[in-house]
Amino acid sequence: MESLLVGNGWFEDTVPVRTLYLDLNSYFASCEQQDRPELRGRPVAVVPVEAETTFVIAASVEAKRFGIKTGTRVSDARRMCPPSCDAPKGLITVHARPERYVELHHAIFTAVETVLPIERVWSIDEFECKLLGSQQEPDEATRLALACKRAIRTCVGERLTCSIGLAPNRVLGKLASDMQKPDGLVLLRPEDLPGAIERLGVRELAGIGPNMEARLHKFGVRTIGDLLARSERDLRSAWGSVIGAEWYHWLRGRVVSEHAVVTRSIGHEHVLAPDLRTSERARGVLIRLLHKAATRARQKGFVAGEISVAVRGFAPGETTGGWGLSARREAPKAMARALLSVPTADTLQLVRIVSGLFDDAIAGLEGIPPIKVAVTLGALEPIYSASGSLFDQRPIDSPLGKAMDRINGKFGRHTVYPASMHAAKSSAPMRIAFGSIPDPELPA
Ligand SMILES: [Mg+2]
């Protein structure tokens, strides 16, 4: 087998169907329909709180037929789905129960593993299995896919349907799983490529969001076929990184090593206005900086393996806005750092960690009021190369964070934000372009 080095990763020549990619259909809504038979066959929207001004987190298959999807405002969703013969009560809104969805995630994990070992959990409702040896034969791969569907139905619940993509690699497997919903099964053999995918728009590819789509349009690329017509060098310059070269090979069914670690960091700091120089207000500003950094990390497709917090105290004799050298030299500083067992870009998970680090840093200042706070997300790596922990099966993906990004991208940057930054909402102005909505890939 021939191998070539591309940037930091290896790829090898095409071999048959190596990946089974499983994506649950309308996951959160299906969990509710599974647990509550009265919701079955009904247009259901899962919502974070019972309020008309809030946004839909997940829509059932029936609600999607009315055009309702993640990010639709509840009042709009009700207008889109009024009481009718099909839906006598109109749209039914259901309060989200995240713990239950995680519980069912583990049950689904166990059910799938009765058929095939799971190679990687990509999100709360997406799993990747590797096919080996004779499992790569199309007939056998199809049999295994049907067995996975059956295992979920019988071990977890008949309402939990999934779409499965069988393809030469993970990227094409994910694409295939999106091609038929609900309860789909799509097989992409090497000989089906590129015919089966070339007419699809580039946004059908998970990982190509509106920003990248706009960028590709400038290069005259609208469909997957257009991407396939370009050289590896073209794609590299369209992406501005080695990731373009990876797409070149992924689309050709090759396997590119996904273990290249990108060492990068994203950090923000802020000098506190006089009225914010208390530890509780400084905490609010810090959480806000974290929210910004985590949003940027998600936009870039990164998860952080390390997080650090720095707090500078008000130097003795320092006046407001006093940045004289002598004052700075004496300024007390405190830092705290944590390594994450499971890399993440999930704002709420990071808020908990940062809050603890801030307590440590503030304790280090021994009562001196804070004047500057900073947070850095480090050991960043692309989400596709990050591996989870055996002992902590929280998904490394951040469906909630992405939902927040989408809602903020659509309705303004402070539509939803962590409660802990409420007091500091207007300080530390958001400098990143929120017009750029990140990849809206969500459990659907
Ligand atoms: Mg899904």
Image (cartoon, rainbow, N blue to C red):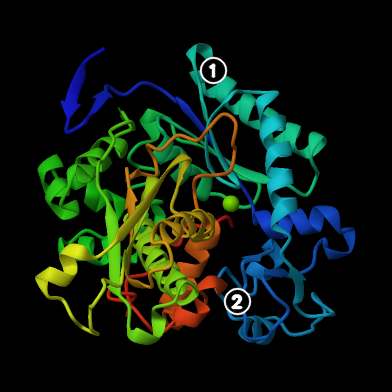
Which residue is under mark 1? 135
For badge 1, the amino acid type reads Gln
Does mark 1's beta carbon lie closer than 8 Å to ligand 1? no
Residue 251, relative to residue 19: is it above or below? below
- Height in image: 322 above or below 25? below
Q: Residue at position x 75%, y 77% from top? A: 91
Residue hosting label 2: 55
Return the x and y of residue 125 as percentages of the image width and height: 60, 47
Of residues 378 and 75, the one drawn nearer to the viewer in this rendering:
378
Q: Give me the residue at 38% from left, 61% from top.
A: 365
Whole-percent x and y of residue 75? Answer: 65, 86
**Rendering coords of residue 149 (x, y %):** 69, 36
Which residue reaches farthest right?
Answer: 38
Q: Is mark 2 within 8 Å of ligand 1?
A: no
Distance of mark 2 from mark 1, alpha carbons? Answer: 42 Å
Q: In the figure, 358 relative to 118: above or below?
A: below
The quadrant in which residue 52 appears is bottom right
